[in-house]
Amino acid sequence: MSTNSYRNGGSGSRGGAMKFENYSNNNSKYSPSSSFKSKVQQSAAAASTLRRSSPGTGRDDSTISARVRVAVRLRPRNSEEMAADADFADCVELQSELKRLKLQKNNWDSDTYEFDEVLTEFASQKRVYEVVAKPVVESVLDGYNGTVMAYGQTGTGKTYTLGQLGEEDAADRGIMLRAMEDILAEVSPENDLISVSYLQLYMETIQDLLNPSNDNIAIVEDPKSGDVSLPGATLVEIRDHRSFMELLQLGEAHRFAANTRLNAESSRSHAILMVHVKRSVRGKTSPFSSENGNMTPMGKTLKPPIIRKSKLVIVDLAGSERIDKSGSEGHTLEEAKSINLSLSALGKCINALAENRAHVPVRDSKLTRLLRDSFGGTARTSLVITIGPSPRHRGETSSTIMFGQRAMKVENMVKLKEEFDYKSLSRKLEIQLDKLIAEHERQQKAFENEIERITLEAQKRVAEVEQNYADAFEKEKVKCQKDYMESVKRLEEQSAAKQENNGHKKFKDGLSDNGTDQKSNSQSQPPVPPTSSEVTKIKQKLNDEILLRKAAEAEVDNLNNQLIHWKNMESARNSEISKLRKMLEDEECGKAKLEEEIEMLQSQLLQISFEADQSRRNLDKRLSGEAPSSLDSLIPRVKDQQLREPGDGEKASVVKLFEQVGLHKILSLLQSEDADVRIHAVKVVANLAAEESNQEKIVHAGGLTSLLALLKSSNDETIHRVAAGAIANLAMNETNQELIMSQGGISLLSLTATKAEDPQTLRMVAGAIANLCGNDKLQIKLRAEGGIRALLGMVRCRHPDVLAQVARGIANFAKCESRASNQGTKTGKSVLIEDGALPWIVQNANNEASPIRRHIELALCHLAQHGKYLTAFYVYLIKIQDGQIYGKPKMLDFFVTEVNAREMINGGALWELVRISRDCSREDIRALAHRTLKSSSGFQAELKRLRIDYG
Ligand code: ADP
Ligand code: MG
């Protein structure tokens, strides 16, 4: 390909190639042609250039491939150019309908380039907004991230295009104002939130244009989502157009003041406007509602409402002309480098992306870190490159055009920034729960009141009946007694009256008979029997008595029956009460179950969210072709392993759910009765522990202690594996290492290693111990508690991942040992040699797995360096002068003892060192081995003895 031929439109599969040939006017020869790929598709709506990555209807549909769109804008000649270049033609010629630009190479030859849009000097601000920014703004309103950026030489109209305020003529308003107008017209003030930060990046320092005292803002990257944010920047909520205008004016004023203070030109700094759009998606909320008071089944269909958080970034870049490195602008060379750094890093990233290179140096500058989502990320990006017409700046114009051409090859994977609104779901669940509890309490109270009322009524009725009975009984008794007494009295009276009658009669009878027999007669006279009428009367009385008695008895029976009836009723009520009590207990039981289920669901959600995050990141990584992480780092592997188990398919992006559920809650789930919950919880904790930012919180909340306790108490290998992984991650930090040791961690890890069968469990345990091995302070204790033996014991499992961790531990330990011996805090032979590690080390020094080999190579160098002791011989010289004795020591000789050298030679380690110093592919290790051999007299002597010439 000739040097002046450029392609745009990415890889060769899209579109057909077209050739444009320039006719040379001097000798009828064709000039070198400029070849193109025709563009993907040309359409006014950006959406039509999109290609769906997955045709399904699921949420994955939210990821769409979209190329960075590039427009070129030509500034009209200014008065100076009109005067100075009046005789010269413009160095560019625009064919806006064909979307082509011709750049004059010389008088007879030009190169042709094709762009997504070609905007002539007559293009209005409105049209520029519509073709460059409007599709991006619309996409931001739909929930995608978006970037609009201007690139070009100072004075070509970047600020005019983006930041013009149009105070005098509203038609001059630039993209920033027009974008905000469109956003404000679309959002609803009740449901949506628009907030803005405005920043300047100069000499790799980010300053807040809304609060100038805030002049060194840090970029924070979410390790999970890769999203960058500036938590230190002022964020102002925008409600209307006027407040935004004022904010831009304020930013401009601060920018001017800051640059005066720094003695900087504003053309050397980048201005960055970030508009955060947060919208809740109506009509997509969950069917979770229970106005009628019925319980919603807590099934998996539970869907929280959805919110979209997108971001529009508008970047007015520094002038693209190179700063003079000679310092003629008053900058030192260092300053010049720093000023150029971000812009040249951006160029490098775009080159790497355009050429599909595996490594994109995003981390090289603050600008590229800030814009990582804009190029090769998930944002929809539109770039406007601005050029001037003057032939004097042809060089700069040409390099601007090349920049634009390369940017056109960058492909982004635009992704919907949508997430479940777990906060509001959680709030809803809480309200629901509160309602249920209140309703339950109300029912219980009413029920208790009813029972009390029924009991009181029953008691009252029983007491009433008893009282009635007693009264009636008493009355009847008194009446009977009275009747009886009366009858007795009447009988006595009757009997007395009868006797009297009899006496009179006898007297009359005696007067009529002789008087001799009177006495005997009176003595023999029998009592007169009562007359029959009296008998009947008495009988009648008796009958009456009997009848009365019977009536009384019947009354008593009746009352007894009533009593029995009331008692029956009471017992029926009692049984009803106990039935209701039982129902109450059942309800309470049901409530507890529901609460448990909610807990479980929350923990599952948490787990799922982390899984989703992980797979998304894996996907992102694969897409961006990031290089695999360093061999030493345990984090990504630990996570990978844990998350390999399948989720339920519902992959949602949740950034910090654990903040909502709460760390303490998650840690408390580690002790749950339910084994499933325990496993979920430990996985969640392990995931959290994989992020350095969470580690301190976890340890502070007692997570380390709980994890160690789990190792001790559980017999489940999955739990062992995950818990050990979490401990390994926590063990990367020095303070935590001491904590692990002081809490008996070594013996627990050793025990786990002895029981473990799964190589992944062993890898985690070995990883944890390997981390501890790197701590200078813990050397003695680690060995004393069997850490080294446990580590060496794990080589029984031949899995290379396990062996790599063992090797890393050995290397770490050997390094600390050699450091201690150099500082004089350790004497004697290496503990590793004493504990019998040398044969394994020698055996694996040339292991085919490079992680194992590298660690062992380092370990060997450290072992060889450690343990050199200097022994010196002194004499004490005495001199006697003028009767005084003077003395001073004088060194006669010294020799160096190398405590490890003998064992290493005998064990074959010398050969490995020689091999490393000659063959190792890593130059630093090769040099280290060489130095080590050269400086050791023991090794040198042995090499000499064997007549090996080691130069
Ligand atoms: P930059 O930000 O690239 O350094 P400016 O936006 O400050 O350039 O533009 C330099 C000058 O040119 C300003 O006075 C601006 O008003 C003017 N200018 C730039 N582009 C245009 C245009 N398209 N139409 C009219 N004037 C323009
Ligand atoms: Mg400018």
Image: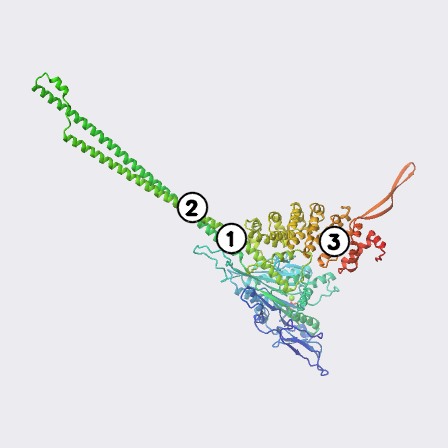
Is residue 140 rendered to the left or right of residue 924? left
Quick check: 948 above or below 509?
below
Type of residue at label 1?
A: Glu
Asked if the residue under mark 3 is in contact with the one under mark 2, i.e. CB atoms within 8 Å, the reply is: no
Residue 841 is tagged as 3
Q: Nearer the observer, disc 2 or disc 3? A: 3
Please tell me how crowded label 2 is: few (under 14), some (14-19), or many (20+) other residues with Cα within 10 Å: some
Query: Does the residue tagged 1 have its C-beta within 8 Å of any atom of ligand 2?
Result: no
- Work out how far the residue at label 3 is from the one at label 1, CA to CA, in angstroms: 52 Å
Q: Nearer the viewer, residue 182 or 686?
A: 686
Of marks 3 and 1, which one's residue comes earlier in the chain?
Answer: 1
Of all residues shown, which one is farthest toward the right?
A: 882
Of marks 2 and 3, which one's residue comes earlier in the chain?
Answer: 2
Residue indicated by mark 1 = 597
Ligand 2's quadrant is bottom right
Residue indicated by mark 2 = 581
Q: Nearer the viewer, residue 584 or 283?
A: 584
Name the colour scheme: rainbow
Q: Nearer the viewer, residue 150 or 780?
A: 780
Type of residue at label 2?
A: Arg
Percent across and percent down for residue 324 are 73, 66
Quick check: 553 above or below 423?
above
Q: Nearer the observer, disc 3 or disc 1? A: 3
Asked if the residue under mark 1 is in contact with the one under mark 3, i.e. CB atoms within 8 Å, the reply is: no
- Work out how far the residue at label 1 is from the one at label 2, CA to CA, in angstroms: 24 Å
